[in-house]
Image: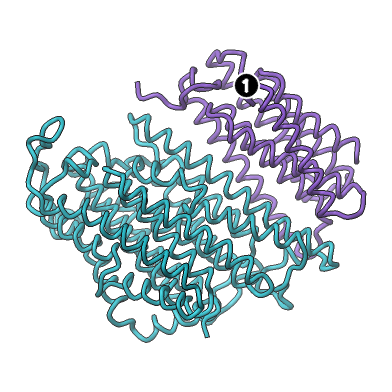
Chain colours: A cyan, B purple
C-alpha cells in the first residue's frame, strides 16, 4: 500500500496512463466518425488506441512502483526528471495522433514526432553507449521517414500527372477515394513507403538501429518503442494497404513478403549468435516484424491472424523487456551466459521470463500461437507454399535457439567457471505483488487472446481484418 | 527555374569535393536559399500565411538556422577544419557523378516531356541519392548529419514541385507547420548529438561516441 502513495513524477505518468486508457476505451462506445477533416475514429484507431494505452499504463505503473526504491539501477534509470516525463507525454500524444490521423502526411508528422520525442529518452546519464544508440535510432528514423514522405509525394505527383488534382492532400477516407494511383510514380512511391515503414518497424535491410537501441535504452523506454511505436508504425502501413492494395496487389505483396523473409532469416541467424538477453529479444522483435510483414503481404485470409499476432506481441514485448530490465538491474549484466537461476533469485521475474518466452515462441494458450497459426494457414490457402516452408523452417530454428539460450537462464545453476566469475545472485529489494501487477495483466491478456476473445473485441478485430482483405 | 535548379545541383555537388565542414554548411545554407527562391518563382510572393510559413521553413530554418546552429557547435568545440563528406578517392567521386547521371536517366523515364518538371525530378533524385551516398560511406557524426539534412532538403525540393494546393487552407497550414516543427526538432537533436560526440568523432574517419 505504501507504494501506492509514493510521490513524484512517475505518479503523474501513471495517472496519465489511467486517463488515457479510459479515454481510449470510451471510444469503443462512439460511432465511427470524423474528428474534423484530418482525424477519424474507425475500427483500426479503436483497436490500436486501446492497445497502446493498455501497454502504456502497464509501463507507467511499472516505473511508478519501481521508483524511488532501492532497486533503481543505472541500467534502468528512466523518467526521473521533468523533461523526461514531458518527452514521454509528447511521445504518447504524438502516438495517439498518428493512429487517429485521417491523412497520410498528417500521420507521418505525428509518427516523426514520436521518434523525435523518443530519441533523447534512449540516453542514460553516464552511459555513452546509450548516446550512440540514441544517435543511431535518430539517424535511421530520419532516413526511413524521409523515404516514407518521399513515397507519399511520388504518389501525389503521379495523381497530378493523371489529372487527379490535389487528391493527395485530401483525407484518405474522403469520397471518392483515390484507390488506384496509376503509373510508375505510384509504384515508386509505394515501394519507398513500404521500405521506409519497414525500416521503422525494424525489418531488413534497414534494421541495424533496432538491436542496439533496444539493448541500450532504459527498459521502460525499450518497451515503449517495441510495443507502442511499433504499432503506430504498423497502423501507418495498414492505412496505406487499406487504400492502395487494390491495383498494386502484386507489387505490395512481393515487397512485403520479401522484406519479411529477409528479416526472418537475419533474425534467426542473429538469435543463434547473440549472448545478450536484450539483443535476443530485439532480434525476436525483428522476427515478429517479419512474420507480420508476410501476413500483411499475403492479405486476404491472414488479416485476422496478423492483428492477433501484432496485439499479442505488444503485450509479450512489453512484459519481456520490463522483465529483462529488472533482471539486468538485479544481476548487473545482460549476458545470457552469465545469468543463471532466475527462477530462484527472482521468482516473479523468472516466471514472467518463462511465460513470456513460451508466448514469444508461439506456444498455446497464448494469442501469439493462434495468430501465427492463422498466418501460416493463410500462406497455405494462398498458395505461398515455398514461403510457408521457409517461414516454418526459420521459426523452428529460432524456436530452438531461443529456448537453448533462455531456459538455462531460468533454471540453470550458477557457473563459477564463467569468465570473470559467476555474477552474484540478486541481493536488492525483492519485488512485491503490487510491482508485478502490470506484467501479470499482460500475461492474462495474452491468455485471453489465445483462448477466447470476448465478443466485442472479436467484432473489433473482424472489422479491422476486413479492411486488410479478409472476407 | 532551370538556372535555379542547376545552381541547386551545384551546391549539392561542390561540398562533396571540398573537404571542409564550413563548405558543407555553406552548401546547406545555399540549398535553403535556393529552395526559398524556387518557392517564390513557383508560388509567387503573395502575402499569405502559407507563403510566410514556406519562407520561414525554407529560408530561415533550412538556409539560416540549421547551418548557424551547427557552425556554432563546431566552432565552440574547435573542430578540425578538414572533414570529408565523401571519402577522398576516385571511386567515391565517380560514384557521386554516377548517381547524378542515374537520377537524370530515371527522371527522363518518369517525366517523358523535357521540362522544368523533369529537371526538378532529376535534381531531387540527385539530392536523395547523394544523401544516401554520404550516409553509406561516412561514419562521422557531422558527415551523417549533413547526409540526413541533404536528404530532407531534396524531399522539400520535390514537394515544391507539386502543384499549388487548393482546398482546406487551414489544414494545409497545419500540416506545413507540423513539418516545419519536425525540421526544427531535428536540428535541435542534431545540435545535441554534435555537442555530445567527442571532437575526434566529428570528422571522418573516426568512431562515433567513445566509452572513455
Q: Is residue B43 visible?
A: no
Which of the pair B27/A113 is nearer the observer?
Answer: B27
Q: Tell me if residue B34 comes above or below residue A32 in the rendering.
A: above
Q: Is residue A327 visible?
A: yes
Tally of marks: 1
Residue B194: give x, y in percent of width and height. 52, 27
Question: What residue do we see at 88% from left, 55% from top?
Answer: B112
As helix, strand or loop, the secondary structure at mark 1 comes to loop
Label 1: how many residues lie within 10 Å, few (<14), some (14-19) or many (20+)? many
> What chain is tagged by disc 1?
B
Q: As drawn, is A425 to the left or to the right of A399?
A: left
Which of the pair A97/B24 is nearer the observer?
Answer: B24
Residue B116: give x, y in percent of width and height. 90, 47
Residue A109: give x, y in percent of width and height. 60, 53
Which of the pair A32/B115 is nearer the observer?
Answer: B115
Question: What residue do we see at 47% from left, 59% from top?
Answer: A261
Q: As drawn, is A448 to the left or to the right of B152?
A: left
Residue A350: name its quadrant.
Answer: bottom left
Question: What residue do we see at 64% from left, 35% from top?
Answer: B133
Q: Tell me if residue B90 comes above or below residue A414 in the rendering.
A: above
Residue A256: name its quadrant.
Answer: bottom right
- Which residue is disc 1 drawn over? B84
Residue B93: name its quadrant.
Answer: top right
Quadrant of the image containing the N terminus of chain A: bottom left
Question: What residue do we see at 45% from left, 46% from top?
Answer: A118
Amino acid at each position: 500500500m505504501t507504494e501506492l502513495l509514493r510521490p513524484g513524477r512517475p505518479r503523474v505518468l501513471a495517472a496519465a496512463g489511467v486517463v488515457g486508457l479510459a479515454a481510449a476505451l470510451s471510444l469503443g462506445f462512439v460511432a465511427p466518425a470524423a474528428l474534423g477533416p484530418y482525424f477519424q475514429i474507425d475500427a483500426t484507431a479503436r483497436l490500436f488506441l486501446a492497445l497502446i494505452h493498455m501497454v502504456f499504463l502497464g509501463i507507467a505503473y511499472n516505473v511508478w512502483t519501481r521508483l524511488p526504491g532501492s532497486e533503481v539501477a543505472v541500467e534502468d534509470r528512466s523518467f526521473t526528471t521533468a523533461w523526461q516525463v514531458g518527452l514521454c507525454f509528447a511521445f504518447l500524444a504524438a502516438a495517439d495522433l498518428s493512429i487517429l490521423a485521417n491523412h497520410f502526411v498528417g500521420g507521418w508528422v505525428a509518427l516523426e514526432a514520436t521518434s523525435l520525442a523518443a530519441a533523447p529518452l534512449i540516453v542514460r546519464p553516464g552511459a555513452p553507449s546509450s548516446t550512440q544508440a540514441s544517435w543511431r535510432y535518430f539517424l535511421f528514423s530520419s532516413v526511413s521517414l524521409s523515404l516514407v514522405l518521399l513515397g507519399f509525394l511520388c504518389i501525389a505527383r503521379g495523381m497530378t500527372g493523371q489529372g487527379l488534382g490535389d487528391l493527395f492532400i485530401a483525407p484518405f477516407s474522403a469520397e471518392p477515394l483515390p484507390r488506384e494511383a496509376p503509373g510508375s510514380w505510384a509504384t515508386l512511391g509505394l515501394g519507398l513507403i513500404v521500405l521506409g515503414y519497414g525500416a521503422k518497424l525494424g525489418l531488413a535491410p534497414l534494421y541495424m538501429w533496432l538491436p542496439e537501441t533496444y539493448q541500450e535504452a532504459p527498459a521502460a523506454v525499450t518497451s515503449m518503442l517495441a510495443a507502442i511505436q511499433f504499432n503506430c508504425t504498423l497502423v501507418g502501413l495498414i492505412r496505406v494497404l487499406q487504400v492502395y492494395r487494390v491495383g498494386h496487389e502484386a507489387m505490395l505483396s512481393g515487397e512485403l513478403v520479401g522484406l519479411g523473409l529477409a528479416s526472418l532469416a537475419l533474425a534467426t541467424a542473429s538469435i543463434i549468435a547473440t549472448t545478450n538477453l536484450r539483443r535476443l529479444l530485439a532480434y525476436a522483435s525483428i522476427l515478429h516484424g517479419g512474420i507480420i510483414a508476410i501476413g500483411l503481404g499475403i492479405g486476404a485470409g491472414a488479416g485476422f491472424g496478423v492483428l492477433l499476432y501484432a496485439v499479442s506481441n505488444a503485450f509479450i514485448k512489453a512484459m519481456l523487456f520490463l522483465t529483462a530490465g529488472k533482471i539486468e538491474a538485479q544481476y548487473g549484466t545482460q549476458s545470457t551466459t552469465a545469468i543463471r537461476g532466475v527462477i530462484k533469485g527472482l521468482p516473479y521475474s523468472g516466471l514472467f521470463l518463462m511465460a513470456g518466452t513460451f508466448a514469444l515462441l508461439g506456444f498455446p494458450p497464448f494469442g501469439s500461437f493462434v495468430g501465427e497459426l492463422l498466418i501460416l494457414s493463410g500462406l497455405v490457402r494462398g498458395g505461398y507454399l515455398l514461403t510457408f516452408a521457409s517461414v516454418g523452417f526459420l521459426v523452428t530454428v529460432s524456436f530452438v535457439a531461443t529456448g537453448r539460450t533462455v531456459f538455462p537462464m531460468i533454471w540453470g545453476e550458477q557457473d563459477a567457471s564463467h569468465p570473470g566469475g559467476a555474477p552474484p545472485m540478486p541481493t536488492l529489494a525483492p519485488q512485491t505483488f503490487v510491482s508485478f501487477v502490470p506484467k501479470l495483466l499482460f500475461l492474462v491478456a495474452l491468455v485471453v487472446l489465445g483462448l477466447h476473445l470476448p465478443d466485442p473485441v472479436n467484432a473489433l478485430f473482424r472489422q479491422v481484418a476486413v479492411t486488410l482483405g479478409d472476407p | 527555374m532551370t538556372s535555379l535548379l542547376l545552381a541547386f545541383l551545384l551546391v549539392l555537388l561542390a561540398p562533396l569535393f571540398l573537404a571542409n565542414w564550413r563548405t558543407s554548411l555553406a552548401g546547406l545554407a545555399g540549398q535553403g536559399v535556393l529552395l526559398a527562391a524556387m518557392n517564390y518563382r513557383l508560388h509567387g510572393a503573395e502575402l499569405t500565411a502559407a507563403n510566410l510559413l514556406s519562407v520561414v521553413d525554407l529560408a530561415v530554418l533550412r538556409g539560416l538556422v540549421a547551418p548557424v546552429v551547427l557552425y556554432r557547435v563546431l566552432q565552440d568545440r574547435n573542430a578540425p577544419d578538414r572533414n570529408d563528406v565523401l571519402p577522398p578517392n576516385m571511386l567515391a567521386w565517380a560514384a557521386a557523378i554516377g548517381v547524378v547521371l542515374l537520377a537524370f536517366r530515371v527522371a527522363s523515364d518518369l517525366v517523358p516531356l523535357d521540362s522544368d518538371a523533369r529537371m526538378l525530378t532529376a535534381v531531387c533524385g540527385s539530392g536523395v541519392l547523394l544523401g544516401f551516398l554520404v550516409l553509406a560511406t561516412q561514419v562521422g557524426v557531422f558527415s551523417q548529419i549533413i547526409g540526413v539534412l541533404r536528404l530532407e532538403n531534396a524531399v522539400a525540393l520535390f514537394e515544391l514541385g507539386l502543384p499549388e494546393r487548393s482546398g482546406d487552407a487551414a489544414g494545409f497550414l497545419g500540416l506545413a507547420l507540423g513539418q516545419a516543427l519536425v525540421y526544427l526538432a531535428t536540428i535541435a537533436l542534431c545540435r545535441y548529438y554534435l555537442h555530445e560526440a567527442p571532437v575526434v568523432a566529428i570528422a571522418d574517419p573516426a568512431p562515433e561516441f567513445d566509452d572513455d
